[in-house]
Amino acid sequence: MVILADQVLWPITRTRYGFNAETEAIFPETVSFVDANLPLLVAGFLFISAFAHAAIATVLYERYVEYLDRGMNPYRWYEYSVSA
């Protein structure tokens, strides 16, 4: 997926305060923080999701079923917290 994808860089910016010495005013200034590689982010999301599902389907299965019997599904929220 990463090899076949085009190089798409997603600019991530941050805002900081700048100071204009002539007017002695503070103003918001947007600066480039990092350029994230979008295909790597997508592949990473899919890998995290696949890893979580594989763990739940194998080594965590018995505990998963116990939680479902009690009407709970915390593993879903653990995965969402990491992949969101």
Image: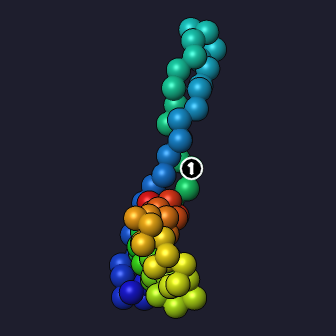
The residue at the point 50 percent across, 59 percent down is 81
**Place of residue 83 in the rendered image (x, y in percent of width and height, measured from the top left):** 47, 65
Q: Is residue 15 above or below residue 71?
A: above
Q: Is residue 52 visible from the viewing direction of this image?
A: no
The colour scheme is rainbow
Q: Secondary structure at mark 1?
A: strand
Q: Where is the N terminus found, in terms of image quarters?
A: bottom left
Q: Quadrant of residue 38?
A: bottom left
Which quadrant does the C terminus fall into? Answer: bottom left
Give the vertical position of 15 relative to 34 (above or below). above
Q: Residue at x 46, y 79 (%)?
A: 65
Residue placed furthest toward the top: 23
Left/right of residue 21 with respect to residue 40 in the rendered view: right
Question: Which residue in the protein does label 1 denote?
Answer: 33
Other residues around mark 1 within 10 Å, as few (<14) / some (14–19) / many (≥20): few
Name the residue at the front extreme: 70
Residue 8 location (% of width, % of height): 39, 69
Amino acid marked by disc 1: Phe
Residue found at x 57% / y 12%: 25
Query: In the rendered view, would you say 68 is above or below 1?
Result: above
> Would residue 75 be visible to someone looking at this image?
yes
x, y percentage for residue 66? 49, 76
Q: Is residue 14 left or right of residue 19?
A: left
Give the camera-side residue of 79 and 17. 79
**Residue closest to the eye, 6 or 47:** 47
Residue under the image location 40 percent in, 64 percent down: 71
